[in-house]
Image (tube, helix red, strand yellow):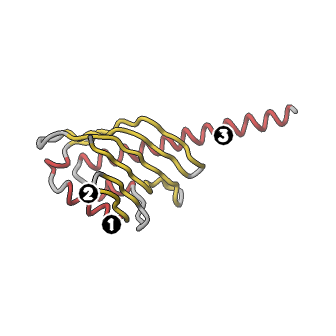
Amino acid sequence: MRMLLLLVSLAITSQVFSQQNDEKDLRKLLQDQQEAWNRGDISSFMKGYWNSDSLMFIGGKGVTYGFRNTWERYKKTYDSREKMGTLAFDLLHFIPLAADAYMVVGKWHLTRTVGDIGGYYTLIFRKIDGKWLIISDHTSQG
């Protein structure tokens, strides 16, 4: 019985540490994206996304499928530093879905000379080849 309790305790402790490390990695990825955006570097910002035709970005105009199309959407919508502004994320919830999947809910805000905008987002991350990547991004404005 003692051995069983010890094994259960070790398993729980291991899972807690793993989740803490995953959350730390996800926070780092989002911080890197924020910094890339604020440098005007959409290419580096996109490194947080899954480079796949199966990537989904859901916004006010519907669903954009694929990495290339999502990148083009960002470049078209934010075609100047004035439109890009300064990005700030407010991370609200980290929800583990599976050992290799997380949902992150947060707020975003762009401070811009052409008018501030912001809203909320839900990101689904998968760990692919040992790296956390956004596989689905649902971003709302308002």
Looking at the picture, does residue 42 appear above or below residue 69?
A: above
Taking the image as shown, residue 40 lies to the left or right of residue 67, namely: left
Which image quadrant for residue 10? Answer: top right
**Residue bearing the label numbered 1:** 68
**Residue bearing the label numbered 2:** 74
Taking the image as shown, residue 41 lies to the left or right of residue 64, namely: left
Tell me where residue 125 appears, x and y as whole percent: 47, 51
- Secondary structure, mark 3, is helix
Cα distance between the residues tagged 1 and 2: 10 Å
Quadrant where the N terminus lies? top right
**Residue bearing the label numbered 3:** 14
Residue type highlighted by circle 2:
Tyr
Query: Which mark is nearer the camera, 3 or 2?
Result: 2
Looking at the picture, does residue 103 appear above or below residue 43?
A: above
Mark 3 nearby-residue class (10 Å; few <14, some 14–19, many ≥20): few
Residue type highlighted by circle 1:
Arg
